[in-house]
Amino acid sequence: MSYEELRFPRESVFLVTGGAGFIGSNLCEALVEMGHPVRCLDNLSTGKYENIAHLIKRPLFTFREGDIRDLDTCMAVCEGVDYVLHQAAWGSVPRSIEMPLLYEEINIRGTLNMMEAARQQRVKKFVYASSSSVYGDHPVLPKREGAEGKVLSPYALTKKVDEEYGRLYKSLYGLDTYGLRYFNVFGRRQNPEGMYAAVIPKFIKQLLSEEVPTINGDGRQSRDFTYIDNVIEANLKACLAPSEAAGEAFNIGYGGREFLIDIYNHLCDALGKQTEPVFGPARPGDIRDSNADISKARELLGYAPEYDFKRGIALAIDWYRNNLQEKQA
C-alpha cells in the first residue's frame, strides 16, 4: 500500500513544522494533494520559501513564518490541529559540533515547546523527526532499536533527548508520540548548496557544474539511503498507528546499504561524467556505517517502503538535472 491510498477523516487538519524544508515541503505537498488542510510553520532559517511557493495559493494550504523556540507561536499553530508532523530542526553533524548551544535551543527546546503545545491543544498524534545518528558508536549492523551506543555529536544528542521527551510525554501525559529515525533521506528539493549540504545533491550539482567533488574519508563508509517518498509514507502511517505503539522510536530506512564511492561512481555514470573525486579527511562525529532494521516499523506502523535506492536515485537525478539546469539557463 502506498501512502496515497491512506485514508484520514476529510476534515483532519495537519501541521507540518519546518514545512518549507526538504522533508517538510514534500509532506505539505502530499497532504494538500490528498485533500487535507495543511498548516506550515517555518522560520526560513534553513527552509526556503521557493519550496512551498507552488502551494501558497492553494486554499488548503496556510503558511506561517514563525519559530518553534517561541511557545506562544507553537500554541497558536497547534490550535485545532489533529496531527503534528514535526520536522523543524537544524541538521548537519559538523555544524552541530561548531554550534552546540544553538542546536540545544532549536532541536531540544523547540521540540519540547511543540510537544507541550500539542499536549495542551489536545492534538491526536505527534510524529517527529529523529535520526539514525542516535546509534552513535554501536558497531553492530543492521541497526536495531534498543541497541544504541554513545552518541558522537551534539546533533545526535539532541535527537536522543527528543526521543526521551517523546517517551515521557506518552507515559506522563498521554500524548501519542512517534519518533522516526531517518536514515539518510534524499530526493527532490534537498538543498545542494553550502558546506553542510547532503552528499547526494551536492555531488549531483558539482558534477553537473563540472566541479570536482570531495569525498570525506576513504569512500568505503556505507549508508542506508532512503528516498523521500518512503519518509512521507512513514509519517502518514505513524499518524494512523495504534496508541499502543506510541512513545517509541522507529527506524525509517529502506533496509539497504550503499557505499559512498559506489554512489559517486553511479552518479558519474548516470550523468555521463568521468570526474575523479578528491579524497579529504573523515568528518568528526560521523557514523562509519549505517543500515536499518525496519522490522519494528513494519510491524507497529505498517511501514512498507516501495522505493529502493536504485529507483529513488533515478528519480532524484532526473529532478536535479531538470531543476538545476533550469536555474543555470
Image (spheres, rainbow, N blue to C red):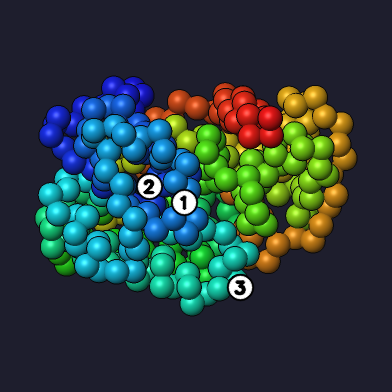
* Residue 298 drawn at (x, y percent): 36, 36
Mark 2–mark 1 Cα distance, whole angstroms, equals: 7 Å
Q: Residue at x 41, y 73 (%)?
A: 105
Q: Which residue is mark 2?
A: 19
Counting residues from the start of the chain, the first of labels 2 and 3 encountered is 2
Q: Are marks 2 and 1 in contact (CB under 8 Å)?
A: yes
Counting residues from the start of the chain, the first of labels 3 and 1 encountered is 1
* Residue 127 drawn at (x, y percent): 30, 49
Q: Residue at x 31, y 27 (%)?
A: 33
Counting residues from the start of the chain, the first of labels 2 and 1 encountered is 2
Q: Residue at x 14, y 30 (%)?
A: 10
> In the depicted view, which residue is nearer to us: 157 or 203?
203
Is residue 188 something that shows in the picture? yes
> Which circle marks residue 47 in the picture?
1
Q: Residues within 10 Å of mark 3 (few under 14, many from 20)?
A: few
Quadrant the N terminus occupies: top left
> Which circle marks residue 98 in the picture?
3
Most extreme residue toward the bottom is: 101
Three-letter code, disc 1? Gly
**Front position among marks 2 and 3:** 2
* Residue 242 drawn at (x, y percent): 19, 42
Q: Residues within 10 Å of mark 2 (few under 14, many from 20)?
A: many
Mark 2–mark 3 Cα distance, whole angstroms, equals: 25 Å
For mark 3, give the secondary structure: helix
**Front position among marks 3 and 1:** 1
For mark 1, give the secondary structure: loop
Is residue 241 something that shows in the picture? no
For mark 2, give the secondary structure: loop
